[in-house]
Image (cartoon, helix red, strand yellow):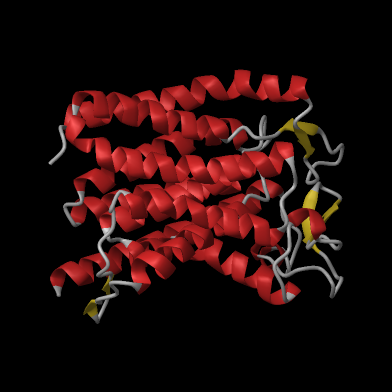
Amino acid sequence: MLPAFTAALSLLLGFLAVERLTEPWARLMLRKGICGRDVHKPDRPLIPEMGGVTIVVGLAVGMGFFTALNPEFSLTAAAFLSTVVVAAVVGVVDDWLRPLSPLEKVAAVTLAALPLLILGMYTPYPVLPFVGGLRLTLIYPFIFMPLLVTVLANSVNMLDVLNGSMAGTSTISALFLTLIAVLFSQWETAFLLGLLAACTYGFYRHNRYPAEVFPGDGGSLAVGAAFAAAAIIGRLEVLTLIVLLPALINGSLILSSLGRLVERRGIKERPTLLVAGPRIAASPSRQAPVTLTRLMVASQPLREEEVVRGFMALNLLTGALALATALFMLGG
């Protein structure tokens, strides 16, 4: 079991690093012209982008402090943080240096699984509810791990469409998974997920409606990769997929409705419209992609905050479902 006081202090330091650094970082991005239009506001204000880099900084601060006092955690910290950083770098390149094609982004994010593979931070026997452990000696490290990292990273990224949607739902998801990791006595994984929750909440305070800063691909891809890394390290793969079902469903809806991989910038028809209120309404166009947001406003237009609360409610439900599944697995 990890030293509780040191772990709690590390979580606090991670939260404070994100909470304190995000505002000055956002001002720097604004001065550098790294901004995006908030299309769900009538005046479409310019909002600093790439703010999610501070989430990565917060994770590094929290893990750095904890590892300095608990060097036996070094290998786990190195594998987890390296995975997050690789995904963040892919996002920063896409946000700032050169827009990546959908295939380039997917291929690049799969590289984030390499630190876990190289450092051997995986067990090729995933545990399935009702089935038990599977033996996937070759499939797990060379197919399943890269696939899980890129699917979760890109799914979380595609949920970053409204103020606070990615950071808010990720905080809820990480909290549920922290509790599940504790139930399975996966203390290191519980620490990683608790730190992730602390950092995403620190960012959420600046990204919630009306957003002062956007996470950008650098932030959202990193958060998704963090979920994947923690799932692999703690053998919580299936339970993580259950918790993140809203993001996975949203990504599946987009891909199936468009029929191909497509970058957000390449979508010609927006899935939603801004109407008087201001409220978000579903687009009537058949060429517009189907998204979770579009489905939520299909019956009536909603305010942006209401849609985000709907996302969070869905994550509470899937988190509760994952927790119930975990309790069943422990009881069985």
Q: Quadrant of the N terminus?
A: top left
Q: Residue 104's x, y, as percent?
A: 66, 57
Asked if residue 90 is positioned above or below residue 318 in the image, the reply reads above
Quick check: can you spot residue 311?
no
Side (left or right) of 178 relative to 247? left
Residue drawn 42% across the image and 41% down it = 82
Q: Which quarter of the figure has residue 74?
A: top left
Residue lying farthest bottom?
131
Q: Quadrant of residue 258?
A: bottom right
How many numbered marks are there? 0
Q: Quadrant of the C terminus?
A: bottom left
Comparing 179 with 144, the one in front is 144
131 relative to 95, above or below: below
**Relative height, residue 188 to residue 291 (above, below):** above
Residue 113, image x, y percentages: 43, 54
Compared across the picture, whether 106 is left or right of 227 comes to: right
Whether residue 308 is situated above or below residue 75 in the rendered picture: below
Of 220 and 179, the residue lying toward us:
220
Q: Position of residue 3 (x, y in %)?
A: 15, 32
Residue at image location 71% in from the left, 51% down from the top = 100
Residue at left offset 68%, top offset 51%: 161
Horizontally, residue 126 falls left or right of residue 55, namely left
Q: Is residue 140 visible?
A: yes
Q: Nearer the viewer, residue 83 or 30?
A: 83
Q: Which residue is at a point 28% across and 72% down the rendered structure image?
A: 137
Residue 264: quadrant of the picture: bottom right
| Residue 245 at x, y percent in the picture | 48, 65
